[in-house]
Image: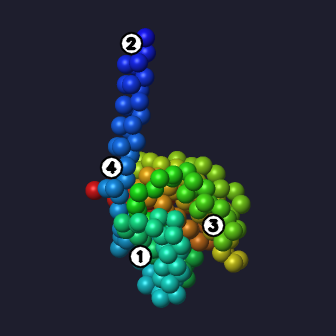
Amino acid sequence: MVVLCVGGGTALYFATKDKVDEVVDATKTRMTTPETLAGRPKVTDPQLQTAATQMVAEMKKDVPDATSTVGAFYGDPAKQDLVMIGGVSGLIADPKKELADATKGLGSELAVTNFKPVDAGPLGGDAQCGDGKAQTVPVGVCVWADRGSLGVLVLYYKSGADLQKEFAGMRAQIEQKD
């Protein structure tokens, strides 16, 4: 009986320790706006920046105590090479719920109907990518969530499969751990 109690206590300790480690790690997460993203220059068009700012404002509703935010466009719209990024960092109690809510919202905004789980990359958490449309323009959309961040990448004129190839690298440029 003592062995069972010690074993149960040990299991509880490790489960609790893992949660505490996740929370501590989450507090070290911050979002940054790189000068270039996957070789694409930052776009300074005011209309595009307004769109990115609006998206970040919506995301902050889900993470009201956000410690950092990012919203920007990269690439060259004339060459049909455009990426929008949006993200927030802060303690996220239920990353799976935030991911589900984000995919639902983007599903209606960008008509994404086929979100599928993908590898979130070395930064961890959960991620999903799919295909959508921004008016008549095809877009690839990837969303991620973990204990310390919630983010979205939208690749215009391409598919979710195209974006998935660049997803982990782009996320690593945006999301930093202190």
Q: Give the percent coordinates (x, y) of residue 49.
A: 48, 82
**Residue bearing the label numbered 2:** 2
What whole-number distance in Å separates the C-alpha atoms at marks 3 and 4? 29 Å
Q: How is the image coloured?
A: rainbow
Q: Please say if 164 is above or below 50.
A: above
Task: From the image, state whether disc 4 or disc 2 is nearer to you.
Answer: 2
Which amino acid, by three-letter code, is at mark 3?
A: Leu
Q: Which residue is mark 1?
A: 41
The residue identified by callout 4 is: 24
Q: Which mark is residue 106?
A: 3
Residue 19 or residue 168, whichever sits in front: 19
Q: Residues within 10 Å of mark 1 (few under 14, many from 20)?
A: some
Q: What is the C-alpha distance between the residues marked 4 and 1?
A: 33 Å
- Identified at 41% across, 34% down, the residue is 15
Q: Quadrant of the N terminus?
A: top left
Helix, strand or loop for disc 3? helix
**Residue type, mark 1 in image:** Pro
**For residue 68, side relative to residue 53 (left or right):** left
Tell me which residue sits at (41%, 48%) in the image.
122
Q: Distance between the Cα atoms at labels 2 and 1?
A: 63 Å
Q: Residues within 10 Å of mark 3 (few under 14, many from 20)?
A: some
Rounded to the nearest angstrom, the CA distance separating label 4 from label 2 is 32 Å
Task: Identify the residue at horizontal 41%, vertical 26% (top origin).
Answer: 11
Residue type, label 2? Val
Cβ atoms at labels 4 and 2 below 8 Å apart:
no
Q: Earlier in the sequence, mark 4 or mark 2?
A: 2
